[in-house]
Image (spheres, grey):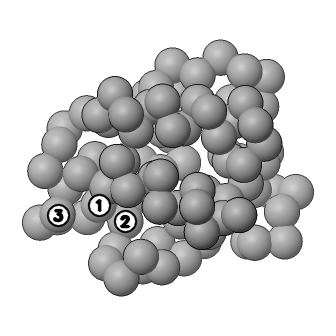
Amino acid sequence: SCTDELLKFSSCLPYVAVSPNNVSESAPSRCCEVVVEAFRDGSAVCFCYLVSRPSILGFPLNSTKVSTLSAVCQHSESNSSLGPVCSGSSML
């Protein structure tokens, strides 16, 4: 479920949160593991919630950083960007 995916995404929060909660200049390795796994198993669509509703977790996220995590984490799967994933989703 997306709830589970969003909980796993918590490892990315130090990187994608808006100031003053953005305490990391780079994506933590666990964050990248979660992102790559989500693209592999098809659950990356859950991250569209974070792009379309950046305050869904109770504090604002940087939508640009969320959107570019697959590139930051050097994900090389064919659908490696949230743009195409989210454009076909009813979440946006």
The part of the image, by quadrant, that contains residue 80 is top right
Q: Examine the rendering and report whether any part of residue 46 can be seen.
A: yes
Assess whether mark 2 and mark 1 are in contact (beta carbons under 8 angstroms): yes
Taking 85 as reference, is 3 left or right? Answer: left
Tell me what residue is drawn at x 79 percent, y 22 percent: 78
Spot occupied by residue 26 in the image (x, y as percentages of width and height): 25, 33
Spot occupied by residue 72 in the image (x, y as percentages of width and height): 44, 28
Assess whether mark 3 and mark 1 are in contact (beta carbons under 8 angstroms): yes
Spot occupied by residue 52 in the image (x, y as percentages of width and height): 60, 71
Residue picked out by circle 2: 61
Assess whether mark 2 and mark 3 are in contact (beta carbons under 8 angstroms): no
Taking 80 as reference, is 9 left or right? Answer: left
For marks 3 and 2 on the same chain, the one whose residue lies earlier in the sequence: 3
Q: Examine the rendering and report whether any part of residue 16 can be seen.
A: no
Q: CA distance from mark 1 to mark 2?
A: 4 Å
For marks 1 and 2 on the same chain, the one whose residue lies earlier in the sequence: 1
Tell me what residue is drawn at x 84 percent, y 71 percent: 90
The part of the image, by quadrant, that contains residue 3 is bottom right
Callout 1, which amino acid? Answer: Ala
Q: Is residue 24 above or below residue 21?
A: above
Residue picked out by circle 3: 21
Spot occupied by residue 65 in the image (x, y as percentages of width and height): 41, 48
Callout 3, which amino acid? Answer: Asn
Tell me what residue is drawn at x 54 percent, y 48 percent: 67
The N terminus lies in quadrant: bottom right
Tell me what residue is drawn at x 31 percent, y 55 percent: 13
